[in-house]
Image (tube, rainbow, N blue to C red):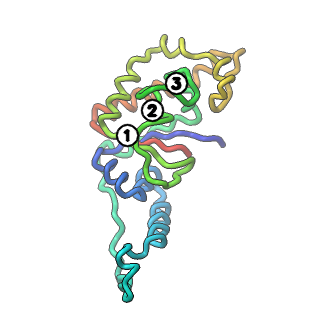
């Protein structure tokens, strides 16, 4: 099936809550699968049934007969707007940085940067969160790439040599190969522009 990347816009206040309480990330990356959030909470409760101070008391408190409800997110307009770029993410990264994994901020944002959301594996590692200010920087940088600049960075021979995922860059069919990451790039550029205009943060996850 391969590795795909998804971007999700979300209010800055929710970004901060998720970074402070990482299990909440499941309410963003899998809003239609509440079981994922419930399972993460249960795992966390098993790891930390009592506070450090309570562990050293002889008389440990009894569990609440009616446990408090788990925290949730009150999502608003513009939250959970999503963009799935399929398996083009590494190709887009190359077009922005001329590298497979390197580059400088903010052009390298797909592969690096942002804040890692705890140690919760949401597919292929943890999600990363970009606050609204970072989203504006990314959006401004993406606006600098028009069709000519993007096409000029496309080099299927080098991409294959660097093993740029998903390694489909056949030199004999450069136009066909270029269209795949390029079409998603322009969708992504619009996504980040909309998020920046609306003052949203963005999460990226790989699954």
The one nearer the camera, 150 or 16, is 16
Residue indicated by mark 2: 109
Please say if 153 is above or below 68.
Answer: above
Residue 9 in the figure: left or right of residue 119: left
Q: CA distance from mark 1 to mark 2?
A: 9 Å
Residue indicated by mark 1: 130
Q: Are marks 1 and 2 in contact (CB under 8 Å)?
A: yes
Q: Report the residue at 61% width, 16% height from top.
A: 155
Q: Earlier in the sequence, mark 1 or mark 2?
A: 2
Picture quarter with the N terminus: top right
Residue 68 in the figure: left or right of residue 4: left
Q: Report the residue at 38% width, 45% height from top.
A: 80
Please say if 22 is above or below 54.
Answer: above
Q: Is residue 65 visible?
A: no
**SS for callout 1:** strand
Q: CA distance from mark 3 to mark 1?
A: 23 Å
Please say if 175 is above or below 103.
Answer: above
Q: Report the residue at 32% width, 54% height from top.
A: 17
**SS for callout 3:** helix
Residue indicated by mark 3: 183
Q: Earlier in the sequence, mark 3 or mark 1?
A: 1
Q: Report the residue at 29% width, 55% height from top.
A: 74
Q: Picture coordinates of residue 58 (x, y %)?
A: 38, 88
**SS for callout 2:** loop
Q: Earlier in the sequence, mark 2 or mark 3?
A: 2
Q: Nearer the viewer, mark 3 or mark 1?
A: 1
Is disc 3 surrounded by few (<14), some (14 to 19) or many (20+) residues within 10 Å? Answer: few
């Amino acid at each position: 099936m391969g590795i795909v990347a998804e971007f999700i816009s979300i209010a800055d206040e929710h970004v901060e809550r998720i970074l402070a309480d990482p299990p909440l990330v499941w309410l963003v990356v899998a809003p239609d699968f509440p079981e994922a959030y419930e399972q993460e909470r249960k795992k966390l409760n098993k790891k930390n049934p009592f506070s450090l101070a309570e562990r050293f008391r002889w008389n440990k408190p009894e569990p609440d007969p009616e446990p408090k409800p788990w925290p949730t997110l009150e999502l608003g307009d513009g939250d959970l707007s999503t963009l799935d770029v399929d398996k083009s993410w590494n190709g887009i990264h190359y077009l922005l940085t001329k590298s497979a994994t390197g580059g400088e901020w903010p052009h390298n944002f797909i592969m690096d940067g942002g804040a890692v959301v705890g140690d919760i594996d949401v597919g292929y590692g943890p999600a990363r969160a970009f606050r609204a200010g970072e989203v504006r920087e990314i959006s401004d940088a993406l606006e600098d790439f028009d069709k000519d600049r993007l096409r000029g960075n496309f080099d299927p021979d080098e991409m294959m040599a660097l093993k740029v995922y998903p390694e489909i860059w056949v030199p004999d069919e450069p136009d066909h190969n270029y269209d795949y990451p390029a079409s998603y790039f322009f969708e992504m550029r619009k996504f980040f522009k909309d998020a920046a205009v609306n003052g949203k943060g963005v999460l990226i996850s790989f699954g």
